[in-house]
Image (tube, rainbow, N blue to C red):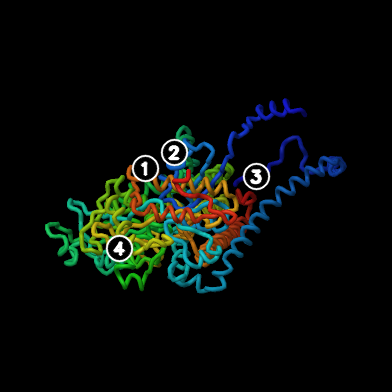
Amino acid sequence: MTSLPNLPIEGIPSGRPSGETRWQSLIGTDRSDRIYRRILTGFALALPSLIVILFAVLFVESLPALKKFGPSFLVTSTWDPVAEVYGAAPMIFGTLASSFLALLIAVPLALSVAILLTEFAPRWLRQPVAFLVELLAAIPSVVYGLWGIFVLIPFLRSYVVPPLKAVFGWMPFFKGVFYGNSLLAGGIILAIMIVPYIAAVSREVLLAVPTSQREAALAMGATRWEAVRSAVLPYGRAGLIGAVILGLGRALGETMAVTMVIGNRHDIGLSLFQPAYTMAAAIANEFSEATTNMYLSALFEVGLILFVLTVVVNAVARILIWRVAKGAAVGSKAL
Amino acid sequence: MNRTTSLALAALLGVVVPAAAQFQITGAGATFPNIIYQNWMLTYNQTHPDVKLNYQSIGSGGGIRQFSDGTVDFGGTDAPMSDSAIAAIGGNVLHIPTVLGAVVAAYNLPGVAQPVRFAPDVLADIFLGKLTKWNDARLTSINPGVTLPNQDIIVVHRSDGSGTTFVWTDYLAKVSPEWSQKVGKGTSVNWPVGLGGRGNEGVSATVRQTPGAIGYTELGYAMINKMSFGVIRNQAGNWITPSLESVTAAAAGAMKDMGESTDFRVSITNSPGPQAYPAASFTWLLVHKTYPDSAKSRALVQFIWWSLTDGQAKAPELGYAPLPKEMRPWLEARLKSITSGGRPVWKGPSAE
């Protein structure tokens, strides 16, 4: 995701006066070079075309549902396979709500870890902690789901929800009965799952901030925290946004762990205690037993919406990064 | 290349010239009977090494699709094919029941040791979200001597499409007109209330972790996991504890209504048998009425007949209820009707 700044390498002049013509004379003359180039082009084109094919298949398969339900598919809440009436609004809501809840929890956590590991922690502690955080990413999501059911939810029920209700019970977000499987549990599981991604990339970004930035701030009389806040973080902001978006992308598509704790209910509600549903979970749950064509097509349309949503999120992220990266921020090129 | 070298080459490549014809028979479908199907196939292959059977448990919906597309030789399903799906493949399908399963109302009531009794209308209203407290008078009146807590009832259902859901909703639809009208029956339905758990394990985990929860799971699954499950009043008015015997009794009790010429696409929920557990169901194999390859289809039918007779003995230990023995003549007649090139592929067990 990140690259070191392109420093000129000693001994090689940055312009290429006489070398250029020599290189050009070599390029494209040899037959094996041309073949090699064609093979590479083929491989390189295969990936974008895969995306196009993916989109085309999703679109074609969801045509029956698109024709029957039209735009109402996006805003209605009934999901009734018996009556063949489908609306995906609760799933779209649930996907976005759980992912943003996850970001809300994960971003401060992951940034803290990254800042600690690059700026404050003693050297001997950095590698082991970084390794352990990244190890979180290696745990299969079904294990997170099981852990969620048997550890997280009972913990939330006994120790987290009662005080939350006592203090914030007047807010619509904390109203209603907590059954365990809920948007809150889904969001927390997702947060834990995306922390290692955001932390690892943020750490790389912060490591790439030149020491001179820190030294300059410290020389101005800044404390270490002030140096981080005023010099290091702004310098790496594009890369940090990229890290967050990477986490968001993962949260949007996560299936197994979420479906095990979110309650899988086609419902929209403000309360974090309510069960909800996500698009990825619904597809995984219902696809294998979708017996009618319209049912199958509705699930394909859910897939299409998820696909478009992730593309839009990534596009917005890219624009955001370009915006903030107008300075020569670290990592902007790689992102 | 002469004969010797080619033989040597064949040996070198590990190619074994088969002594008799080899049959590769593939099937796909329901996950519920997967354990016993795999067991049958393994056992059958030991005595019939020339028949290689393979079953992929991809779900009933996928099984029906692959069977209809002709990518597998037979299918497996927990919910019978609809009339329109049968018409779409020109009616070229037979439903052969193999074993029985049952769905139980599993609940989590700490401190309640006796099994809780459920009347059909009570069960329907719980899942409709109309009966919301464990100490509701309608529950306490049918549970004398059981102290039911003043606790919310939390409904847990399957979030994935499932034959278990089909059996459960089919039963509720039969005993409750309101359920039939508002929700209906299907492998997934629009649940009026409740939390969704993925798979039997998801439902049972949620039930276990949530005091006051009630869900439904396969009988075999609930037994293995030692969950508490409810006693249900059947059509004859008896309180029936779910067990393999009461499930087999449900099929036996439903035979009168089915009749000898049945296509077996019958629901046996709410069976009239006096000892019948009401939320029971067949699981079916889907086979074609006509096959192009006579020898291969004979091998398949022979395997199915073996499963329906000798294979049944395996069922109880694996958590499935065997078919009632009285059903065998009907099954034999149906298997005999399978043809290839206009001739029956199998002439019955006596002809072998």
Look at mark 3 in the image and give the residue it sits on. Answer: A5
- In this view, which residue lies farthest toward the front? B351
Q: Where is residue B171 in the image (x, y as percent from the top left)?
A: 33, 63
Q: Which of marks 1 and 3 is in front?
A: 1
Q: Where is residue B203 in the image (x, y as percent from the top left)?
A: 35, 54
Mark 4 and mark 1: Cα distance apart in space: 26 Å
Secondary element under disc 2, as helix, strand or loop, is helix
Label ID, residue B314: 1
Callout 4 crowding tier (Cα within 10 Å): few <14, some 14–19, many ≥20: many
Position of A121 compared to A310: left or right? left
Chain under disc 1: B
- Quick check: do tags 2 and 1 share a chain? yes
Image quadrant containing the N terminus of chain B: top right
Label ID, residue B300: none
Mark 1 and mark 3: Cα distance apart in space: 69 Å
Mark 4 and mark 2: Cα distance apart in space: 34 Å
Most foreground residue, A176 or B112: B112
Q: Give, as a three-letter code, the residue at label 4.
A: Asn
Mark 2 and mark 1: Cα distance apart in space: 10 Å
Look at mark 4 in the image and give the residue it sits on. Answer: B270
- The image quadrant of residue B247 is bottom left
Look at mark 2 in the image and give the residue it sits on. Answer: B43
Q: Give, as a three-letter code, the residue at label 3.
A: Pro
Q: Give, as a three-letter code, the residue at label 2.
A: Thr
Position of A291 compared to A315: left or right? left
Chain under disc 4: B
Callout 2 crowding tier (Cα within 10 Å): few <14, some 14–19, many ≥20: few
Mark 3 and mark 2: Cα distance apart in space: 65 Å
In primary-sequence order, the first of circles 4 and 1 is: 4
Q: How many labels does the image show?
A: 4
Instruction: Verify CB contact (< 8 Å) between mark 2 and mark 1.
Output: yes
